[in-house]
Image (cartoon, helix red, strand yellow):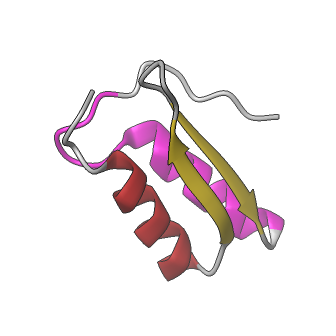
Amino acid sequence: MRGVFYRASTRDKAIRIGVAGGVKNLPNGNVESVFRGEKHKVMQVIEWCKKCPAYSKVDDVSVT
């Protein structure tokens, strides 16, 4: 999905929660995120990613 600002919204949410890392769009349309921080804060961002920001659609969130 293009133009829904998922990457930017995820970055902004992570910053507000106090998590470092990065978010990038992949050529296949997926988004890849790397988060660093306190476990409970990282989990907050991951849970937010599953719910997704407005106008986006999340089919799956994979955590490694």
- Rendered location of residue 47, percent (x, y): 55, 47
Quarter of the picture holding the N terminus: top left
For the point 81% across and 72% down, which residue is it?
A: 38
The secondary structure making up most of the magenta span is helix
For the point 21% across and 43% down, which residue is it?
A: 4
**Residue nearer the viewer, 31 or 62:** 31
**Residue nearer the viewer, 51 or 18:** 18
Q: Is residue 11 left or right of residue 37?
A: left
Task: Give the answer, above or below, for where 45 lies relative to 46.
Answer: below
Quarter of the picture holding the C terminus: top right
- Rendered location of residue 55, percent (x, y): 17, 39
The residue stretch that appears in magenta: 39-57
For the point 30% across and 28% down, which residue is it?
A: 57
Task: Give the answer, above or below, for where 41 lies relative to 28.
Answer: below
Q: Is residue 46 left or right of residue 31?
A: right
Asked whether residue 47 is drawn in magenta, I would say: yes
Task: Give the answer, above or below, for where 17 lies relative to 3.
Answer: below
For the point 42% across and 71% down, which residue is it?
A: 12
Asked whether residue 21 is drawn in magenta, I would say: no
Q: Is residue 54 left or right of residue 60?
A: left
- Rendered location of residue 48, percent (x, y): 47, 51
Task: Give the answer, above or below, for where 56 lies relative to 37.
Answer: above
